[in-house]
Structures are given as C-alpha cells and as structure tokens.
C-alpha cells in the first residue's frame, strides 16, 4: 500500500485543501446537536423568540456550511483518486509492456488484464473512500466522544463501553475477509482467461461443435467466482447488521440511563436529545470506519497484486560481456565480421531439459538464412532468442560482434523488422497497421504494400479502410501480406519472416521472395519456413529436428548430404507437381 501512496504524493496539495474543508464541515456537523441541547436547556426557558430564531439561524448556517463543505471536499477527493489511479494505470501499462516474455507468461495474460482493470478500480474506490470518510469518521468519533464527555461523562461511558466490542468485531471480520478477496481476484483471473479463450476461439468452438462443452466450462468458473465472492461477501456483510444491533443497543441504553438521570436531576432533557444525535453520529462513524476497512481489505489485496507487477525486477538487463567476433566454426569464413553468430546456444523455456541445443551458425550482412524443420523443432525459438525475448541458457548470440546481452534492448530491437505467425492486426486503418506509429510517409507505406504483394487487396479496400479487430475481415493470405508489409516498411537491418508466408500461394510466395531479394540486398534475411521453395536460394539453411540443427548448408549441399531435407524437398515437389 505504501507503493500506492507514492502515487498520491503529487496531489498532496489539493488533497490537503480538501481534507481541511472536510474537517471544517465535520466540525459544523458535530456542533449541531450541541447547539440543539443549548437551545432546549438554556434558550427556550428564557422564552425569547428572538434568541430562539437567532440560534436557529446559527444552526441553519452550520448545516449549510457542512453540506457545501462536504460537496466541495468530496469532489476534490474524487479528483485526487481519479488522477492518482490514472498514474497507476499508466505506470502499470508501461511496466506490462516492458515485461519480458518469461515474466508475462509467469503472470499470465488474464491476470495482467484483471490487474490493470479490476484491481486498479478497487484502488480507485479505496483512494476516494479514504479521503471522504478517512477524515470525517475519526473526527466524528473523537469529537463526538469529547463533546459528550463535557456534557455528561456517565452517559458517555455507556457509549465508550461498547467500543471494544465494536473493535473486536471489525478486526475479526476483516481478518477473515482480506484473504477471501484475494481468492476472489484469483478466480476472476481464471474467469477472464476462460472468457478470452472462448471469445477469441469462437470460430473453432462452433466448427467443432464444442459450444455445449465450453458452456459447461464457463458455467463452472462462473460459479466458482460467484461462490467465492458470495463467501467473502457473507463474511463482510456480517458487519452491517452487527453494527446496527450495537447502534440500537446504544440508543436504548442512552434513553434508559438518560431518563433515569433526568429524573434524578443529574442530567437535562437537552443533553439527552443531543446524546441521541451523538450516539447516532458516533456509531455511524464507526460504521463508516468498518466500511472503510472493507474497501481497504479489497483494495489492499488489489494493491499487492498491482505492486507485484510494478516492482517486478527488470528482466533481460543489459550485461557487460567480453567482446569477441567469431567462434563458431563456419565453412564460409572470408575474414569479414559476421553480423549474427549463434555460438553453442542452448535454451530451455522451463529451466529443465533444453528446447534448443547447441546451436551454432554464422551469418554475414545481407545474407539469407533459411530455417526449416517439423513443428516444434525449435525454429521460432531461435528467432525469439535472436531478438532477446528470452536469454540463452548456455552459449551466446553475437550481433555485429557484440553479445546481444550487452546491447541496449531498444537499439537491439530497432535492428529487426519481423513478421511472426499470427501476429496482431489492430482495429485501425490499413495505413496505420503498416506504419505502426513510425510516422512513415504514404509513399513508404505504398512501397511496402507493393513489395509485400498486397497491392490488389489494399487498392480494393483503400489504404484508409478500417480493419476489424484482429483483421477478422481479411483472409489468411491478406493478413500475412499486411504483416510482411509492416515488417518491410521499417527498412530494417535484419528482416525476420517467421512462417509468415505459409498462407500464400506458390506464385505469390515466389514473387514476394523475388521482391525482397531485389530490394533488400543489404538486409540480412531470416526466413522460417515449412516449404523448401521459400528458402531455396538462402545462403545458409538450418535443418532442425527436436531442438537441434541436424544439418546446415545450401540447398544443393543439403539435397546431397541430408536425408531428412531430401525427403521434405521430394515430398513437397510431388505435392506442387
Ligand atoms: N512460450 C513457451 N513456453 C514453453 N515452451 C515453449 C514455448 N514456446 C515454444 N515452446 C516449446 O519449445 C519447442 C520449440 O517450439 P518452437 O515454437 O520454437 O517450434 P517451431 O519449430 O517454431 O514450431 P512450429 O513450426 O510449429 O511453429 C516446442 O517443444 C514447444 O512446445
């Protein structure tokens, strides 16, 4: 929670003014029953209508001040809560966008979403509530007790005697409630994940007639959230009836003891009337405090979840490593410094057995690397390691002679232009989906469209046509060409096409390769493909199987030396014939 309070600091000035107004408004409220007691006991017996009216005027003025002051202070409180939450959300979003792939997978996507939405909403509620009631309730409680003490200490003791019971009740209820709300949030994460999967996979669910199955899965998680929330709510809702019971008990005691004391001449009727108001004020203040605890319980669970992300240590930090040019034996050595070197690289996603092993290759600037292999062979993993989405477990990757761990992450990523399998298309214009915030000119965008073989459909739709979310109104091949255009538009030093032309027909794929070869001769090209035809002319082809490079070389060499490559090539030729 301390971390969250840090976001309130910039608004401290405005908040303090609001709190001062709140204090004054609360003091006015506290003054009212006291003034009433004075009128009943002192002014009315004097039988002076003028004085009664004057005191009535004073009470009216105090009521107006309290009413207006509360409105102004509450508005200020809402503004502070809104602004502070806006900063929290912004920082949270920034942090989420900088989390490494491993960290994001650790938190899970649905959890990140609900932390940025539901949890920040809970914090917003708490920040507003604390300012509105955090000052009012304690002043009412303390002020009420002090004023009643000056009026009738014995009656006040009746009230004070109830407070330990109230404190124990609040403590017991919140102690049980806080962990329960954490569990509710965790269930809500799973709920969001379920909804997200069902909504994004709606087509496959329908195609495979899994609607009933998904409905059952959804009903189960829906029920889990409801039951957990209900349990937490049931514990917390004990507070209100118990408080009401104590409030009414307090009123009964004051009336009984008060009536007896008036009869005995130990107290006055005005004091009893004022006491009835103060009992209500004091016990309401305690009720407000208990409500605050309730919201605080929820918000502190949320604050812990938000802080967990904000304080997540920076992963994939820049590290000083020894500079070295080449070390992986390569038959094509010509004295130039290779642009990319994989030096005995191994990597495991889980930290257990490696998903890619002992990868060794070198690539010169402007060369084309083709990576081919069966599904799950480790092709995309090589790309993710090269772009430092993950750090290698063993070995090292050099870019322009420097270990990528010693590169500034932004500088490193700027070197690449990548089109991944199933990349995201945003609900925006075609032009903006290609430009992607890089302020590219119309000409640059159109050139990229042309090179990506996307002219026909882009002309049909228009560059400014708004696309549906995730490009739902585009065909698979159109989506892929749009993603390739996005990668080409930045004119990167290294172009990565990760299985990104699989939905293109052979002729379009061939034209795309020709265009890339002709216009990006200086660019190093890395092409992950399932088809041999996509990497036929690559300077170096890696054949992967089970996380290992089982053969490397040019197409002709591999046809001669690699049985698996020969087999893939032969089977694809047969299919295309
Ligand atoms: N984020 C991840 N977390 C854990 N394991 C992963 C992750 N991504 C991939 N893997 C595992 O790593 C291995 C290599 O996966 P990779 O995606 O690199 O294969 P690929 O050759 O690109 O496959 P495909 O052609 O099907 O895309 C697979 O066994 C896969 O299950």
Image: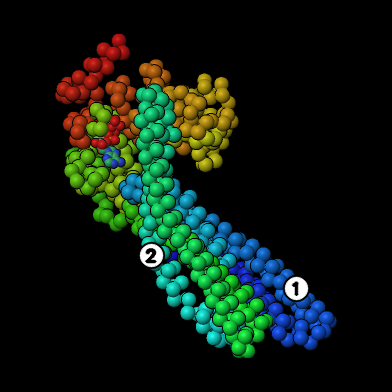
Taking depth in this image into account, of 530 and 141 the one nearest to the observer is 141
SS at circle 1:
helix
The residue furthest top is: 577
In which quadrant will I find the C terminus?
top left
- Numbered tag placed on residue 158 in the rendering: none
The 10 Å Cα crowd at callout 2, few under 14, some 14 to 19, many 20 or more, is some
| Quarter in which the N terminus is drawn | bottom left
* Residue 175, label in figure: 2
Q: Is residue 212 above or below residue 49?
A: above
Crowding at mark 1 (Cα within 10 Å: few <14, some 14-19, many 20+):
few
Q: Quadrant of ligand 1?
A: top left
Q: Is residue 98 visible?
A: no
Percent position of residue 514, x then y:
39, 23
Q: Relative to 202, is 324 above or below?
A: below
Who's the residue at 58% across and 77% down the image? 255
Q: Residue furthest right?
A: 50
Quadrant hosting residue 385? top left
What residue lies at 40% left-to-right and 33% top-to-bottom? 215
Look at 73% across and 86% down and name the residue there: 42
Nearer to us in this view, 336 or 382: 382
CB at disc 2 and ligand 1 closer than 8 Å: no
Residue that carries the numbered disc 1 in the rendered image: 60
Image-based side of 421 in relation to 564, left or right: right
Q: Position of residue 57 (x, y in %)?
A: 78, 76
Q: CA distance from mark 1 to mark 2?
A: 42 Å
**274 or 405: which is nearer to us?**
274
Colour scheme of the picture:
rainbow
Instruction: Say how many tags the image has.
Output: 2
**Where's residue 427, x and y in %?**
52, 35
Tell me where residue 486 appears, x and y as whole percent: 46, 34
The residue positioned 16% from the left and 22% from the top of the image is 563
């Amino acid at each position: 929670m301390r971390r969250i309070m840090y976001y309130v600091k910039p608004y401290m000035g405005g908040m303090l003014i609001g709190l001062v107004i709140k204090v004054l408004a609360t003091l006015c409220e506290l003054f009212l029953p006291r003034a009433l007691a004075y009128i009943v006991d002192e002014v009315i017996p004097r039988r002076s209508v003028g004085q009664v009216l004057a005191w009535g005027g004073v009470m009216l003025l105090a009521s107006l001040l309290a009413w207006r002051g509360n409105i102004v202070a509450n508005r200020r409180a809402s503004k502070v809560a809104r602004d502070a939450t806006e900063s929290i959300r912004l920082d949270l979003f920034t942090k989420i966008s900088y989390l490494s792939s491993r960290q994001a997978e650790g938190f899970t996507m649905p959890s990140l979403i609900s932390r940025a939405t539901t949890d920040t909403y809970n914090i917003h509620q708490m920040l507003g509530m604390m300012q509105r009631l955090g000052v009012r309730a304690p002043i009412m409680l303390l002020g009420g007790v002090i004023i009643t003490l000056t009026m009738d200490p014995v009656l006040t003791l009746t009230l004070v005697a109830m407070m330990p019971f109230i404190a124990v009740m609040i403590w017991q209820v919140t102690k049980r409630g806080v962990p329960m709300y954490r569990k509710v949030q965790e269930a809500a994460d799973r709920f969001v994940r379920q909804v997200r999967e069902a909504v994004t996979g709606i087509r496959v669910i329908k195609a495979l007639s899994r609607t009933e199955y998904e409905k059952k899965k959804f009903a189960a998680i829906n029920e889990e959230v409801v039951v957990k929330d209900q349990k937490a709510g049931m514990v917390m809702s004990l507070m209100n009836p118990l408080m009401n019971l104590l409030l009414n008990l307090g009123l009964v005691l004051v009336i009984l003891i008060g009536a007896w004391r008036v009869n005995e001449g130990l107290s006055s009727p005005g004091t009893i009337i004022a006491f009835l108001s103060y009992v209500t004020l004091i016990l309401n203040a305690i009720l407000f405090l208990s409500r605050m605890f309730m919201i605080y319980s929820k918000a502190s669970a949320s604050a812990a979840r938000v802080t967990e992300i904000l304080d997540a240590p920076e992963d994939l930090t820049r590290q000083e490593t020894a500079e070295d040019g080449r070390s992986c034996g390569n038959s094509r050595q010509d004295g130039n410094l290779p642009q990319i070197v994989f030096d005995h690289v191994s990597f495991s996603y889980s930290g257990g057995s490696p998903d890619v092993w002992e990868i060794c290759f070198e690539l010169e600037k402007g060369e084309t690397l083709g990576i081919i292999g069966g599904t799950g062979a480790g092709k995309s993993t090589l790309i993710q390691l090269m772009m430092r989405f993950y750090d290698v477990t063993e070995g090292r990757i050099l870019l322009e002679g420097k270990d990528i761990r010693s590169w500034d992450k932004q500088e490193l990523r700027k070197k690449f232009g990548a089109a991944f399998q199933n990349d995201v298309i945003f609900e925006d214009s075609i032009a903006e989906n290609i430009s992607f915030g890089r302020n590219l000119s119309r000409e640059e965008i159109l050139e990229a469209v042309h090179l990506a073989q996307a002219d026909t459909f882009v002309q049909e739709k228009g560059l400014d046509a708004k696309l549906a979310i995730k490009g739902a109104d585009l065909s698979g091949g159109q989506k892929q060409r749009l993603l390739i255009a996005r990668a080409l538009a930045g004119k990167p030093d290294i172009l990565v096409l990760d299985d990104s032309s699989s939905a293109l027909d052979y002729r379009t794929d061939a034209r795309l390769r020709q265009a890339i070869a002709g216009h990006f001769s200086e660019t190093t090209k890395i092409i992950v493909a399932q088809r041999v035809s996509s990497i036929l002319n690559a300077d170096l082809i890696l054949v992967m199987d089970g996380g290992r490079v089982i053969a490397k070389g040019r197409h002709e060499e591999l046809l001669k030396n690699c049985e698996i490559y020969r087999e893939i090539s032969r089977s694809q030729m047969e299919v295309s014939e």
